[in-house]
Amino acid sequence: MAKPIFAPARYFLLLAGLLILLLAGASGARAQSCNEDLAVFGKKRNTEIEALNAISKSHGGKLDPVGACPHFRAMGAIESQMLAYLTKNKEWCNIPDDFINGFKANTEKTAGISKQACELAEKVKKMQSQGGGLAGGGNLPPPPKLPAGPL
């Protein structure tokens, strides 16, 4: 009679062990899935950051608003998508509220910079189309005459 008592206990222990292994595997798979998804967003975002750095480097450390605007817009869109993912999968990916709040603040900051850069780019393009450009001309007064002869 001892066998029937121990057989269900073994069965229960075996099922409990399998359940623990499945849950551990699921949380590992869950974490891996989140990491892979976030890595895709991160790679896209880094591509835009590298492009902005290249623009800055080619203009003596200053960003050209005309060239930077599309990259800021793209980065803002990527960060917005990433924020939506983080918010939606907060529980699934075990993401702390502090991280999401910090990322949200960063996304808003990027949106503000993007807005400024694109507004400035629009003004620059408008000036260039009117003949003003950055090099002078258009509605700007002529440059002052420099004195001739020895100083």
Image: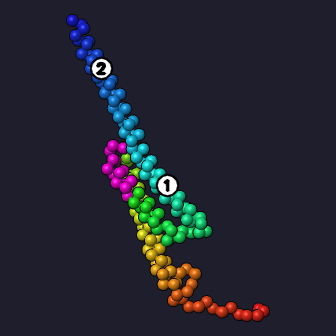
**Which amino acid type is marked by label 2?**
Leu
Q: Residue at x 56, y 65 (%)?
A: 56
**Which amino acid type is marked by label 1?**
Asn
Q: Residue at x 39, y 44 (%)?
A: 34
Q: Which residues fall within the magenta stretch? A: 80-94
In the image, residue 76 above or below residue 11: below
Q: Nearer the viewer, residue 45 or 93?
A: 45
The label nearer to you, 2 versus 1, is 1
Residue at the right extreme?
A: 150
Which residue in the protein does label 2 denote? 13
Determine if residue 147 is in view: yes
**Percent from the top left, x then y, of residue 5?**
23, 12
**Percent from the top left, x then y, of residue 17?**
33, 23
Determine if residue 116 is in view: no
Q: Quadrant of the C terminus?
A: bottom right
Q: Magenta span has 82?
A: yes
Q: Mainly helix, strand or loop, the magenta region?
A: helix
